[in-house]
Image (tube, helix red, strand yellow):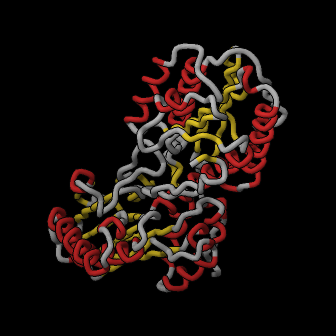
């Protein structure tokens, strides 16, 4: 075509649609030993899998909050390329789950605000809540806020119990009837995080109106 | 003033990799002083959306040529799609697609928009948005022709051309590549295409050229992408 040519410069560059994911992880004293080692291993696998997936790497934004003694913001929301890979979770202290969830909800809300201000499209935010025990602080406010968001379809929560002493009744307060909390099979953190990265990948590839089919959970969940 | 129409649909990288069909469809038509362009984007989640988008494109083009009222067009669409779904033994939602259409008759225009994607026009040398359609808070939320209470989400309008020289009707995949929402700016490609439409009669060659350039679009969108242009003069 002699008089006509187009190049990439003739197109605009819009930011990739984001998938914000908050990990709220129990690192209380009861996680000491093999559970915390497996959690660390699983988390590293999670980051590696996201890095290796072209769409997930561009879309996923991850925030990590732990609750073990105190609530710690280990990683504020960043894209996959900027996640601190040298994080090592350490177990200790009580289980302030309520405060951790409240911090996660605040971080998610702030992130959405930032997306809106920057004109960035985003998917429904996700919160993963993992615990091996019972909360040692009040969860009333955290549960109420979470339920409100769930009711308005403004949040998706994946509550996961670790081991036989995880209080599944408490976890139920952070989810809906059609997405009940699941118990981790043994210490299959790695399998759980592989599933999570695959699911994030599915969301990042989804088209408008699509019902997103999540990956099979049988590898990590007790069914 | 003569009217020229041009359009193309290209399968996105995602559907190509999955071995699926292109779920976008477009139809363009023009005679001496009337013209119509229609774009439909089949829902990724709907198993037969490529059939839905093809049906809706054809039905809407014919209905607009007959200058049917918008309400009647939507009612007719729903009836025909319901019959098709029944015949195929599938849910109506399996035929889900969006709809964007512009019709021009002499100095007047009208448009219908259901779902996402974008309709824009060029006036005084500047491209501006006519309809951004319906977008929910989240990226995967939109409505389709087959959605419940679709009547509540139909965006339609009409007016005098009054200096408008061109309409651009595009699926959301194309929008992602040519419209900077934050800055409200359009990519240069739209201006270039219009200039080329003025210079040549060989629009088939232009279409082939764009399809050869599809890799360029793949750097901006994984979705199918469709653009239809209606140009005066």
Based on the displayed image, in which of its 4 quarters is residue A20 positioned?
top right
Quadrant where the N terminus of chain B is found in the figure: bottom left
Specify whether A57 is left or right of B101.
right
Q: Measured along the vertical axis of the image, is residue B136 above or below residue B29?
A: above
- Provide residue A212's location: percent of width, then percent of height: 50, 55
Where B152 falls versus A1 (above or below)?
A: above
Residue sitting at 48 percent across and 37 percent down?
A155
A69 relative to B158, above or below:
above
Q: Is residue B168 visible?
A: yes
Looking at the image, residue B48 sits to the left or right of residue A13; the answer is left
Indicate the position of residue B131 as horizontal and vertical percent values. Answer: 35, 53
For the residue pair B99 and A133, the one nearer the viewer reads as A133
Left or right of B196 in this view: A151: left
Farthest residue in the front direction?
A164
Q: Quadrant of the C terminus of chain B?
A: bottom left
Which residue is pictured at 84% across the width and 33% down the height? A86
- Residue furthest toward the right? A86
Can residue B232 be seen from the camera position used here?
no
Identify the residue at horizontal 60%, vertical 40% (top origin): A183
Q: Residue at x 56, y 49 (%)?
A: A223
Taking depth in this image into account, of A106 and A191 the one nearest to the observer is A191
In which quarter of the view is residue A27 placed? top right
Depth order, front residue of A72/A130 = A130
Question: Quarter of the image holding residue A38?
Answer: top right
Q: In x, y percent, where is residue A206?
A: 53, 57
x, y percent for residue A211? 45, 56
Label total for image: 0
Q: Is residue A117 left or right of residue A6?
A: left
């Amino acid at each position: 075509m002699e008089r006509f040519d187009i190049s990439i410069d003739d197109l605009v560059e819009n930011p990739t649609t984001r998938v914000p994911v908050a990990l709220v992880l129990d690192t209380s004293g009861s996680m000491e030993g093999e559970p915390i080692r497996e959690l660390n291993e699983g988390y590293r696998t999670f980051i590696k899998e996201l890095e290796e997936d072209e769409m997930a790497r561009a879309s996923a934004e991850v925030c990590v909050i732990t609750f073990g003694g105190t609530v710690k913001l280990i990683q504020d929301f960043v894209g996959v390329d900027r996640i601190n890979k040298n994080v090592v979770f350490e177990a200790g202290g009580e289980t302030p789950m309520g405060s951790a969830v409240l911090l996660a909800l605040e971080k998610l809300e702030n992130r959405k605000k930032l997306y809106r201000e920057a004109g960035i499209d985003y998917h429904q935010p996700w919160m993963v809540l993992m615990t091996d025990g019972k909360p040692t602080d009040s969860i009333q406010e955290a549960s109420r806020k979470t339920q409100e968001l769930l009711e308005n379809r403004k949040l998706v929560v994946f509550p996961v119990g670790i081991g036989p002493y995880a209080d599944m009744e408490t976890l139920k307060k952070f989810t809906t009837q059609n997405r009940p909390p699941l118990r981790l099979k043994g210490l299959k953190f790695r399998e759980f995080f592989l599933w999570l990265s695959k699911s994030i990948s599915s969301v990042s590839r989804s088209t408008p109106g699509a019902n997103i089919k999540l990956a099979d959970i049988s590898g990590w969940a007790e069914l | 003033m003569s009217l020229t129409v041009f359009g193309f649909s290209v399968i996105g990288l995602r559907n190509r990799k999955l071995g699926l069909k292109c779920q976008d469809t477009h139809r363009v038509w023009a005679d001496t002083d009337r013209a119509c362009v229609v774009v439909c984007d089949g829902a990724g989640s709907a198993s037969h959306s490529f059939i839905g988008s093809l049906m809706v494109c054809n039905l809407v083009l014919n209905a607009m040529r007959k200058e049917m009222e918008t309400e009647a067009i939507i009612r007719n669409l729903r009836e025909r799609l319901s019959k098709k779904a029944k015949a195929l033994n599938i849910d109506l939602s399996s035929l889900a697609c969006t709809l964007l259409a512009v019709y021009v008759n002499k100095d007047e225009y009208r448009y219908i928009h259901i779902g996402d994607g974008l309709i824009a026009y060029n006036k005084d040398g500047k491209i501006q948005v006519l309809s951004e359609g319906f977008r929910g808070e989240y990226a995967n939320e939109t409505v389709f022709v087959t959605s419940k209470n679709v009547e509540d989400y139909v965006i339609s309008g009409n007016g005098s051309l009054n200096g408008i020289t061109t309409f651009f009707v595009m699926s959301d995949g194309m929008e992602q590549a040519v419209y900077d929402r934050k800055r409200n700016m359009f990519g240069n490609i739209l201006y270039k295409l219009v200039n080329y439409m003025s210079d040549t009669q060989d629009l088939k060659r232009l279409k082939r050229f764009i399809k050869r350039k599809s890799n360029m679009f793949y750097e901006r969108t994984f979705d199918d992408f469709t653009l239809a242009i209606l140009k005066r003069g």
